[in-house]
Image (tube, grey):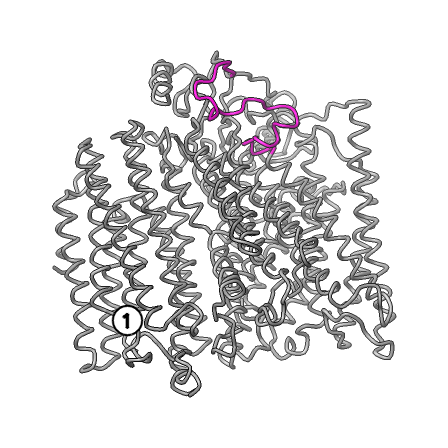
Amino acid sequence: MAITEDRPLALEAGTVNKVAERPLGALTRPQSDVGWASWFTTVDHKKIGIMYGVGSLFFFLFGGVEALLIRIQLAAPDGQFLSESLYNQVFTMHGVTMIFLVIMPMAAAFANYLLPLQVGARDVAFPRLNAFSFWCWLAGAIFLNTSWFLGGAPDGGWFAYAPNTSVTFAPGNGMDFYAIGLQIAGIASLVSAINLIVTVLNMRAPGMTLLKMPIFTWMMLVVQFLLLFAVPVITIALFLLTFDRSFDANFFNVEQGGSPLLWQHLFWIFGHPEVYILILPAFGIISEVIPTFSRKPIFGYPFMVGSGIAIGFMGWGVWAHHMFVSGLGPISVAAFSMSTMFIAVPTGVKILNWLATMWGGRLLFNTPMLFATGVIAMFTIGGLSGVTHAVAPSDTQQTDTYYIVAHFHYVIFGGALLGMFAGFYFWWPKVFGHKLNEKWGKINFWLMLIGFNMTFGPMHVLGLQGMARRHHSYASEDGFGFWNGIVSAGAFVIALGTLAFLINIWISARSAKKNPVEVGPDPWDARSLEWSTASPTPVHNFDVDPVVEFQDDWWHRKWGKNEDGKIVRKAYPEDIAQDGSATDVHLPSPSYWPLVLSLSLPVIGYAVIFTFWLLIPAGALFLAGFLGWALEPADDPEAAHGHDDHGPNDADASADAEAEGASHV
Amino acid sequence: MSEAIATKSDQAVDDHGHDAGHGTTTGISNNKLMMWAFLGSECLLFGALISTYLLYKERFNGFAEGLAPFAEDGRNIGPRFGGSDGEGVFDIPFTSISSFVLLASSLTMVLALSSIRRGEYRNFRIWTLTTAALGSVFIAGQIYEFTEFVEKGLGYSTNIFGSAFFTLTGFHGVHVTIGIVMLLATYIMHKQGRLNQDKAETVEIVGLYWHFVDVVWILIFTVVYLFPQ
Amino acid sequence: MTDTAVDAAVDAHDDDHHPSDLFYVKIAGILALFTALEVGTYFIEDSVDPWFLYLSLSVLMIIKFAMVAAYFMHLKYDTPWFRYLFIAGLVLAMGVYAIFLFAYDVFGLG
């Protein structure tokens, strides 16, 4: 009946939500919202956010193990730990995993959980599509990793330059898994981007104009637009690759006049916006953390928003700086060199504004703040080495050396990942109702920071000495042994830091269970709307729709100016926060079909790679998922109706609900 | 694969479609906003295909002129030259008729929408089915055209022109096919009484997709077929 | 009919943002006419300068594109948000891919 759902989220007093009888047999919607099975059918943005988080942390460990394997291999000259072929697979999958299966879904975890809360909505605009996005991503991720058991993982590097990916040079199935796995993950990103764009534009609480939205929401909105426009480009690139490999097309067949540079262009037209897709979420997170722990509003809010938009926009005009050595010609190189230098400006504005926010603030160095300041310092280093790449002659010498590896780890690990960790520590109490342990948090932070700099700092030196990336081993007379030893030791320090994080999760959960401490709705005295409801967030988010007057509205409800112009407390969060006690809130019903539909996609993938007979089960799954989705009632017919514009006391509501219910049967 | 998503979102036929838009911050219906965001995204998708085609046609011309081996093994067959008769594969008068058919289907699509808006259900059914039928005629023409090309010697892997041409027009054909499925679904839902005047927005969203596919063909017809060598 | 004439026709028909069926038929007629003109160039192809053909075909194509988007897809009457979204995608696509083709020297200008 309905593919999408239209905010069936009205608050209605006295309506009963659970209905015993199901009029539509198999196509009714599952009811349970507790228990393990509920996770498979949930459409709740918070549960989906948590699943994204768990999934991305799992793959973080996976990608981390791959990194350690690389570092064992390279720890000393003439390493024999991995074979050449396995080494290629491991470094390729390390990159693919960390980018597509860790940073992106981790950002999606925060976006899913927080965007509806920060704009004051009860869920995303299309809850079932949201569940579909998650399952689709997970299906793609698992599909990609099954390649390890089905003839070898992708081995052409994470950007998979043609013609290395052609059947001639990559005869195994690895690159097929790469192309189709990323295709499936791309569908997830595209659907999720559309969903979140509609959510942010259309479902803001009364009074929340665009320029009152929290910076995190703004940065995620920019990211969703980047995804919206960048994903189709990689979609085409991956299709061309699949067609070349599976159907003998000639796109990257040099013999026939195909151009390998076509892949590089398409990949980087997607790939450079992708870089900002990775980093902007972390920028958003620390833009929430830093004001909170500096006890000051963000410095230059409009500039923060504007520079985020500018980065998103300019990110489209710099892609060819990845291709300076490919013979673009002087005009292209000069133009892209210039644009790359310009894009440092809005990024610099952001760094300046964070520092200005901290300047004169009463700084509290809790763990989230430690990670956030870590981001500022590390990202600045990565940004500066990035500017050196903008200078084409210098870049020519650095291309494909460890200098590049050092650079992008400083921005992706030192920027994006540390930012995500700041977010974990910051929002943990909101999600799980208890804080993470501070002592272990500090151990986690310092181990990671020190290990990170040990690992990636020396890579600058190695790169300038001429050590090429992706080489299976190096000879002892190259003189790379010393720094490689340090780098490998650093990698294990990072692993210890990650272990400290896992221990912290476990210890904090255990101690919260033993002696539960009321963490309160707003443990950090924070600023945005998610802190104005109970912790952990009640299933319906808000008892009543928040009404927004100011940017940082929640802070303004707690603090105000007295007659001397001094800032004084007006109220305590416990007294003014919503307690989450409302019981009659009408929420979208869970659904099986997003999961079923997404399961069909990897089967289609196996069909393309192995045998087209698999299209039969894939088609059956797809059709089942599709029809089930289309035919199931958008909503529990007897529960209520979905008209958001009817208030609790709307007299027409029940009559309307009956009319609607009738039309469902 | 994004087409698959399009089907779902576009059938998007929401129970609450008629009041969609009320109560959203911008006053715009969620479903329509979703469709337009998706179409914005599709611009980049078809842009990549069209520019790949332009690039490869150019390179193909260069190769066919400069490199003799292609002429010998029959791989020099192109849009307007080469092949056994030296005429190339294109049959402009035939494709022109296809183009008029698809253009006409856009007209019947808007007529279907304005019929259901006025509650003229009989007209709505006629125009919807006509649109789907015109779309099917277009697809049938495309299938015929493809088989003709293959017979003339241009297969998918014959040369870079073949790969680029079939991929671009094939993607468009898949989009049209999905549009036909959406139109039929609209028709069936209407027959079941689940889609009528107050849910005209559903038809409008299907129509947006349909017209988009039409404008893409406007580009393809000019750039691929009519531009001289 | 020229573009201004079309505008005038819209003003006449566009009281409730839903132009009349007759108006749509007229638009389709113009589109068909333009398509016929485009097809016509095929028959005179050998006797005119190719750059003249590129130019005139492109102009006709852009007008057709704009007319379908503006009238059939209602961009002219609907909320500006849709225009922004679609034009954002369109302009981005044209800009990025034009640079891409330029880098390949497809236009023969470099």
Q: Is residue A52 visible?
A: yes
The chief SS type of the magenta part is loop
Q: Nearer the viewer, residue A4 or A602?
A: A602
Q: Nearer the viewer, residue A62 or B16?
A: A62
Task: Return the residue at label 1.
Answer: B90
Relative to A383, B80 lies left or right: left
Q: Which residues are magenta?
A: A18-47
Q: Secondary structure at mark 1?
A: loop
Relative to B78, C77 lies left or right: left
Relative to A155, A657 lies left or right: left
Residue at coordinates 66% horizontally, 31% vertically from top-left?
A430
Residue C28, x across and y down, in percent: 17, 53
Q: Amino acid at mark 1?
A: Phe
Residue B31, x across and y down, in percent: 38, 38
Relative to A212, A80 lies left or right: right
Q: Nearer the viewer, residue B16 or A220?
A: B16
Q: Quadrant of residue B99?
A: bottom left
User: Does the magenta portion include A24?
Assistant: yes
